[in-house]
């Protein structure tokens, strides 16, 4: 009789669901492209969370089915979205005024590298074509709390939580929480080191250490 294979770590959806546990009723939230967009599907039932997009949309609905797609309704990541009864629209200057003015409670972003000091690199890889800087630099500077959701290692197996970022920085000393497919790191303030606070199913602290070069507290 075949035995079930134990699943280790979190899937992308499970990482997004873990990030959604950090949402609070009444929050205004910005979601980055990639895994962070999946947080929208995991907002706890009964909780009111308003999603904001840099391209000028406040109150973003769920991803539409194919027969519901409106090509004029997209988020900052160029994904089609839907509107709600309370959705409002404005120009990008007003959108960035919200971000720079500290009116967004939480941003969930992806990253290519995070340093042990909370620096983030997530907007470009030198030599590769990019569409533009986007709003990440404003988000990490102006939003009250920043959570990064990312794979723990790169496609070639290199750690992504490292002593110092090697890629161009998006922001310095900006990150409050890191959620990976292996674990969760958090720090109480930007003067403190990150602490390992949670392990994904099937993972051990030793396995996390083996795939992390940044210094952190256990």
Image (tube, rainbow, N blue to C red):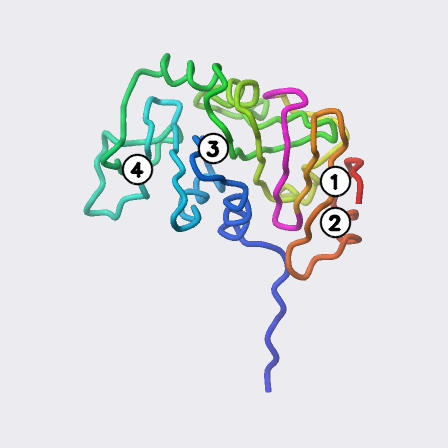
Secondary structure of residue under mark 1: strand
Instruction: Determine which of the numbered discs, if any, sits on residue 208 in the image.
Output: 2
List the residue tagged with mark 1: 195
- The span picked out in magenta is 170-183
Secondary structure of residue under mark 4: loop
Secondary structure of residue under mark 3: loop
Instruction: Determine which of the numbered discs, if any, sits on residue 56 in the image.
Output: none
Q: Position of residue 20 (x, y in %)?
A: 50, 44
Q: Is residue 177 magenta?
A: yes
- Disc 4: CA contacts within 10 A as few (<14), some (14-19) or many (>=20): some
Contact (Cβ within 8 Å) of mark 2 with mark 3: no
List the residue tagged with mark 4: 81
Quarter the C terminus occupies: top right
Question: Which is more N-terminal, label 4 or label 3?
Answer: 3
**Cα distance in 3D space between marks 1 and 2:** 12 Å
Question: Which is more N-terminal, label 4 or label 2?
Answer: 4
Instruction: Determine which of the numbered discs, if any, sits on residue 32 in the image.
Output: 3
């Amino acid at each position: 009789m075949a035995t079930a294979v134990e699943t280790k770590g979190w899937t992308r959806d499970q990482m997004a669901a873990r990030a959604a546990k950090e949402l609070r009723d009444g929050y205004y939230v910005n979601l980055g492209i990639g895994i962070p967009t999946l947080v929208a599907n995991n907002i706890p039932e009964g909780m009111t969370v308003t999603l904001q997009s840099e391209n000028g949309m406040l109150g973003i609905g769920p991803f539409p089915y194919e027969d519901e797609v409106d090509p004029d309704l997209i988020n900052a990541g160029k994904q089609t979205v839907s509107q709600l009864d309370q959705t409002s629209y404005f120009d990008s200057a007003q959108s960035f005024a919200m971000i720079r003015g500290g009116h967004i409670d939480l941003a969930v972003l992806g990253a290519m590298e995070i340093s042990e000091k909370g620096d983030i690199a997530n907007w470009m890889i030198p030599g590769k074509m990019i569409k533009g800087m986007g709003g990440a630099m404003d988000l990490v500077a102006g939003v009250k709390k920043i959570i990064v959701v990312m794979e723990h290692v790169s496609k070639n197996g290199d750690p992504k939580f490292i002593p110092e970022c090697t890629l161009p920085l998006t922001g310095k000393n900006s990150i409050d929480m890191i959620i990976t497919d292996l674990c969760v790191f958090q720090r109480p303030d930007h003067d403190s080191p990150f602490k390992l606070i949670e392990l994904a199913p099937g993972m051990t602290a030793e396995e996390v250490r083996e795939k992390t070069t940044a210094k952190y507290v256990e």
